[in-house]
Amino acid sequence: MEKAQILELAATIGKEVKESDLMKAYEKAEAAYVADEALQDKIREYSVQQQLLAEENTKSEPNAFIIETIQGRLQGLYGEITASKTFVEFSEKQDQVRELLTQINNVMMQQITGEDPSACTHDCTTCHGCH
């Protein structure tokens, strides 16, 4: 089989993944995540608070009260963001897509090397290593 044929098969797999129910559910969850203005506001504020914390920590004499206040706000925002139904659904779908892509890669690597990458024990005596 020639390189072009192999790449064509890879493109076919990519198209099938793109058209899968899992990918459609991911895209729907992503659209809801992006459209959730209240959540996006919290994410933007979280980013700003992180920047403020970093700036305060780089001062020659950081203000402990300001650091504590910012850290408290960051913890609160983190809790609100990660408890959001929109965030949870998007994160779950993102993990599922990532897992599918990992499984596809593992199947291909197993066919190429004869070894199952998902069975790695991190003890290189059981295989040829993770190189």
Image (tube, rainbow, N blue to C red):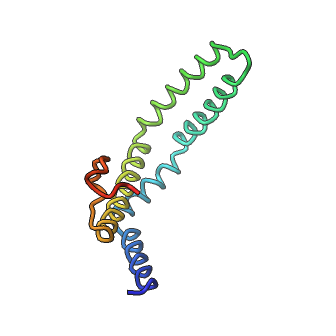
Q: Say above or below: 23 vs 53.
A: below
Q: Residue at point 65% right, 32% down?
A: 51
Closer to us: 22 or 117: 117
Closer to us: 123 or 46: 123
Q: x, y (%) of residue 98? A: 39, 56
Q: Say above or below: 1 vs 26.
A: below
| Quarter holding residue 86 | top left
Q: x, y (%) of residue 12? A: 39, 78
Q: Residue at point 29% right, 66% down?
A: 110
Closer to us: 124 or 50: 124
Q: Say above or below: 47 vs 97.
A: above
Q: Quadrant of the C terminus?
A: bottom left
Q: Residue at point 35% right, 55% down?
A: 129
Question: In the picture provided, is 61 more to the left or to the right than 93?
Answer: right
Question: In the picture provided, is 90 more to the left or to the right than 38?
Answer: left
Q: x, y (%) of residue 93? A: 37, 53
| Quarter holding residue 56 | top right
Q: How many marks?
A: 0
Point out the residue furthest to the front here. 125
Question: In the picture provided, is 46 more to the left or to the right than 109?
Answer: right
Q: Quadrant of the N terminus?
A: bottom left
Q: x, y (%) of residue 10? A: 41, 75
